[in-house]
Image: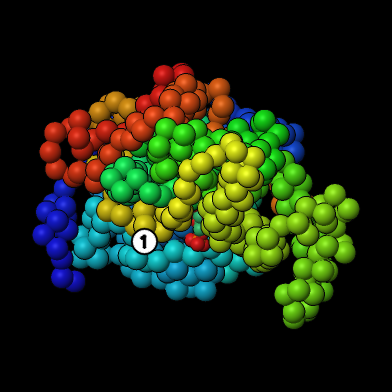
């Protein structure tokens, strides 16, 4: 593979490990844990893996462990640093015993079920150190949930003498890792299952998982390009840029980018829900800001929109919940209708009056997207809904009304952007390169300690990486019961933006000024080489959240 000059230089970067992982480790058990909610239900569903203690590693004298064969799966959307998790895992199991072997299942959980795999040798691993992407083995969204899949997977694990499986994924994939761990333990399969917290969305976190990997790099990439747009915007002074940002339900990405670039407007879905706002309320707020800036001669600006916004507008949320149930229970009948208009009518006829009215009033494209296929985990595919255009067009209409009432005299030109895929495979920042390598290496130590149903946990992340703490937390500890596909299921609780938390509060304290004035910041591209204050800064979200502790 031909490499650019930067890739060649980057390949030589040696990720820094927490001190505890720089030798052999001693496992220190904490207190037994319990799930974040619905303790009785979760306990009953996970009799073998519920209530396990939190684990911390301490450095001890090196010893040679026994050789182990480990399998690894990349699950769900790409996130910068996935390759380093695999490199860390590889180096970790080799450190335990040089005869240990690592097998990668191809294209996500599907490769595990279909027995598609590759042995990851040092030649392959060395090609991918510190690189972005998941292309080393590919990723996929197949949901691991049935006993048949678990048993089929077990066949290949037995054939390859694999005694531990590492699943690198988001909340849904780690939920499945917990279910798999429980199943293998209950059936004495002799296979440990360990999870690693991945997702650019930043919504897989709690007191012991401070952030998911990939969030740092992805938000730095988006902040760089938003900063460039703001510079363009402030140079030409003729467009309002409506910028939708990935992040699925949670608004962590939008909030982090806002803290980095100081836009004129940033919508936070969680606040929209808390304040019971309608779509029209959001549109009116933006239009008022556009008009106020126009009154000062500033007919330009930036609006950041989290991709999950639609799901958080309370009336839309009720509509989506009813739609989810309707489509889950009538999927065959619904998909048998060939014509898009007839499908729309079918939905309108089967919804309650309140929801049917909202659905019928939506632009056809948005309504259609809401009734299209869910992803394998039952989520509406919010990245496909063009919320930025919907808002831009509605703001345009509102401004026309304001103009006719003599409340607005400016010009309103729009540009639309959606940033998501641009950041998911970027070369990991130094933070993500170190964090991911440590997560993978730490997963090897959890395997060597004999535990199952744990997530690799590396903490104290605002300190220099050598001071990071390493250990594991039982996945069941993060679970609660939620309605999915019309049924109550145990799932890892998503971490949404905390409106009382410091990241949001800092934003809220500044946004009125950012709306009226032009306070843009231009973070520039990720730097890999140079002074620590330029290259090794973690996100503002992580920094501010740690102040709350
Ligand atoms: P994960 O939750 O699997 O990490 O995916 C994150 C994400 O990038 C979301 O932000 C986005 O909504 C979704 O994936 C897009 O999915 P796809 O990759 O299937 O287009």
Q: How many marks?
A: 1
Please report the residue visible at 24 percent of the width from the left and 52 percent of the height from the top.
130
Q: Is residue 388 left or right of residue 373?
A: left
Q: Is residue 28 above or below residue 297?
A: above
Give the residue number, with chain letter if any, for mark 1. Answer: 134
Name which quarter of the figure residue 341 lies in: bottom right
Whole-percent x and y of residue 97?
27, 51
Q: Please, is residue 95 above or below residue 511 in the view?
A: below
> Residue 89 placed where, x, y %?
33, 50
Q: Quadrant of the N terminus?
A: bottom left
- Which of the 4 image quarters holds residue 180? bottom right
* Other residues around mark 1 within 10 Å, as few (<14) / some (14–19) / many (≥20): many
- Vertical comparison of 328 with 93: above or below: below
Tell which of 183 and 324 is nearer to you.
Answer: 324
Relative horizontal placement of residue 535, taking residue 110 as reference (left or right): left
- Does any atom of ligand 1 lie closer than 8 Å to the CB of label 1? no
Instruction: Specify whether residue 316 is in view.
Output: yes
Q: Residue at x 46, y 38 (%)?
A: 294
Which residue occupies 43% across, 55% down? 415
Classify residue 302 as left or right of residue 341.
left
Q: Position of residue 370 (x, y in %)?
A: 68, 60
Coloring applied to the structure: rainbow
Say if residue 452 shows up in the picture: no
The x, y position of residue 87, in whole percent, is 28, 53
Above or below: residue 179 compared with residue 23:
below
Task: Say what secondary structure mark 1 lies in.
Answer: loop
Q: Residue at x 34, y 45 (%)?
A: 237
Which of 59 and 259 lies nearest the eye of the viewer?
Answer: 259
């Amino acid at each position: 593979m031909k490499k650019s000059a930067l890739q060649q230089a980057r390949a030589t970067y040696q990720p820094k490990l927490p001190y505890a992982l720089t030798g052999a480790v001693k496992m220190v058990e904490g207190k037994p844990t319990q799930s974040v909610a619905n303790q009785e239900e979760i306990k009953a569903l996970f009799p073998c893996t519920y209530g396990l203690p939190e684990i911390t590693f301490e450095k001890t004298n090196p010893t040679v462990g026994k050789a182990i064969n480990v399998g690894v799966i990349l699950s769900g959307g790409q996130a910068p640093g996935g390759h380093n998790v695999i490199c860390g895992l590889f180096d970790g199991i080799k450190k335990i015993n040089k005869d240990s072997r690592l097998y990668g299942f191809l294209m996500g959980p599907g490769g595990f079920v279909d027995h598609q795999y590759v042995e990851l040798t040092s030649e392959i691993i060395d090609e991918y150190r510190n690189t972005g992407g998941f292309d080393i083995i590919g990723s996929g969204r197949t949901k691991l949930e049935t006993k048949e899949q678990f048993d089929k997977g077990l066949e290949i694990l037995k054939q390859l003498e694999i005694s531990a499986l590492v699943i690198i994924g988001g909340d849904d994939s780690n939920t499945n890792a917990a279910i798999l761990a429980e199943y293998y333990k209950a059936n004495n399969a002799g296979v440990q299952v360990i999870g690693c917290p991945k997702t650019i969305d930043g919504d897989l976190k709690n007191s012991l998982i401070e952030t998911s990997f990939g969030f740092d790099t992805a938000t730095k990439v988006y902040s760089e390009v938003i900063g460039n747009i703001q510079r363009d915007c402030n140079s030409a002074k003729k467009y309002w840029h409506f910028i939708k940002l990935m992040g699925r339900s949670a608004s962590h990405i939008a909030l982090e980018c806002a803290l980095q670039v100081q836009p004129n407007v940033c919508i936070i879905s969680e606040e929209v829900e808390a304040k019971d706002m309608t779509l029209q309320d959001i549109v009116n707020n933006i239009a008022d800001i556009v008009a106020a800036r126009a009154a000062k001669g500033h007919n330009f600006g930036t609006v950041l929109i989290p991709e999950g916004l639609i799901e958080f507008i309370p009336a839309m949320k009720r509509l989506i919940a009813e739609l989810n149930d309707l489509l889950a229970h009538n999927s065959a009948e619904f998909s048998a209708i060939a014509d898009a208009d007839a499908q729309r009518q079918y939905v309108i006829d089967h919804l309650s009056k309140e929801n049917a009215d909202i659905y019928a009033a939506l632009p056809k494209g948005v309504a259609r997207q809401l009734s299209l296929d869910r992803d394998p985990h039952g989520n509406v595919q919010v990245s496909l809904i063009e919320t930025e255009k919907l808002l831009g067009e509605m703001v345009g209409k509102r401004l026309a009304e304001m103009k006719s009432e003599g409340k607005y005299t400016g010009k309103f030109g729009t540009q639309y952007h959606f940033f998501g895929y641009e950041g998911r495979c970027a070369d990991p920042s130094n933070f993500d390169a170190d964090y991911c390598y440590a997560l993978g290496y730490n997963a090897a130590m959890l395997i060597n300690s004999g535990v199952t149903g744990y997530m690799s946990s590396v903490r104290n992340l605002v300190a220099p990486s050598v001071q990071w703490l390493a250990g594991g937390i039982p996945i069941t500890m993060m679970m609660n019961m939620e309605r999915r596909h019309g049924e109550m299921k145990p799932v890892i609780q998503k971490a949404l933006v905390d409106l009382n938390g410091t990241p949001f509060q800092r934003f809220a304290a500044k946004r009125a000024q950012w709306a009226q004035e032009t306070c843009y910041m231009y973070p520039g591209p990720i730097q890999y080489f140079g002074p620590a204050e330029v290259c090794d800064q973690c996100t503002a979200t992580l920094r501010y959240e740690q102040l709350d502790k």
